[in-house]
Image (spheres, grey):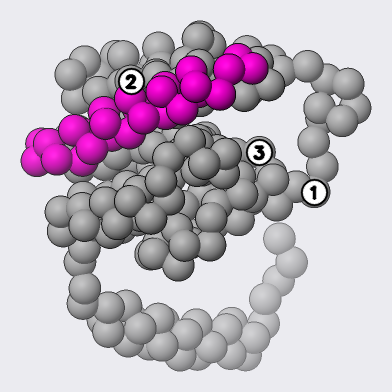
Amino acid sequence: MAEIEEKDAERHRAKMAKRKAVQDAEVAGKTIEKGLLIVNTGPGKGKTTAAFGLALRMLGYGKRVGVVQFIKGKWHTGEKDAFAAFGDRVVWHAMGEGFTWETQDLKRDIAAAEAAWVKALELMADPSISLVVLDELNIALRYDYLDLEKVVAALKARRDDLHVIVTGRNAKPLLVEAADLVTEMGLTKHHFSAGVKAQQGIEF
């Protein structure tokens, strides 16, 4: 490591002390604690992965987590197996029928989405659950399988201490407006376009 002159070290200490004071003041000014409505959207990879990372963090604090998958259903996924190790602390419902181009049956898709939404409402009403992941709900809303206004109203009316994460690309503006936190996953580069297939442990 290069030698650091004392004057440079002192300048750095002073700079960081000022920065710490600003950061501490900003943190001290945040006094609200509430359940958040979080939306992970955008064309990039990682929306569901990020949601499950947050679920793992919640489990680390001894909390219970609920998961409803609106599109994925028949797929076997590593995350489902991993979360099974937490026993009844994770309530998992994979209720999708696959993407619309796979089922090619609009009535069936709508029925599956409606059943998944009923299950989502049940989990949201369970006071023992701290976080609910609504995986690919944005897809169901994009294709109008569910009534957008009713869904958003229910999400806004959730109990005060419940966190909800909605995933899927093309989040509707009404949902984005209602959310507390929205992350847009950008697509800079994806191996799929280079002919790399979905792989175990990466995509599922």
What residue do we see at 66% from left, 38% from top?
45
Residue numbers of the magenta segment: 103-128
Q: Tell me if residue 81 comes above or below residue 14 in the rendering.
A: above
Res. 24 mark: none
Q: Does 184 lie within the magenta span?
A: no
Q: Kindly indicate whether the residue at mark 1 contacts the one at mark 2 (C-beta within 8 angstroms).
A: no
Circle nearer the viewer, 2 or 1: 2
Res. 45 mark: 3
Which residue, given by chain and number where applicable, does mark 1 sit on? 188
Circle nearer the viewer, 3 or 2: 2
Q: Position of residue 197 (x, y in %)?
A: 78, 16
Q: Position of residue 157 (x, y in %)?
A: 21, 57
Between the C-alphas of marks 3 and 2, the distance is 22 Å
Which residue, given by chain and number where applicable, does mark 2 sit on? 93
What residue do we see at 16% from left, 58% from top?
160
Of the image marks 1 and 3, the number of the one nearer the N terminus: 3
Q: Main secondary structure of the magenta part?
A: helix
Report the quarter where the N terminus lies. bottom right
Q: Nearer the viewer, residue 67 or 142?
A: 142
Instruction: Give the amino acid at mark 3.
Output: Lys
Q: Does 127 lie within the magenta span?
A: yes
Label 1 secondary element: loop
Q: Is residue 26 visible?
A: yes
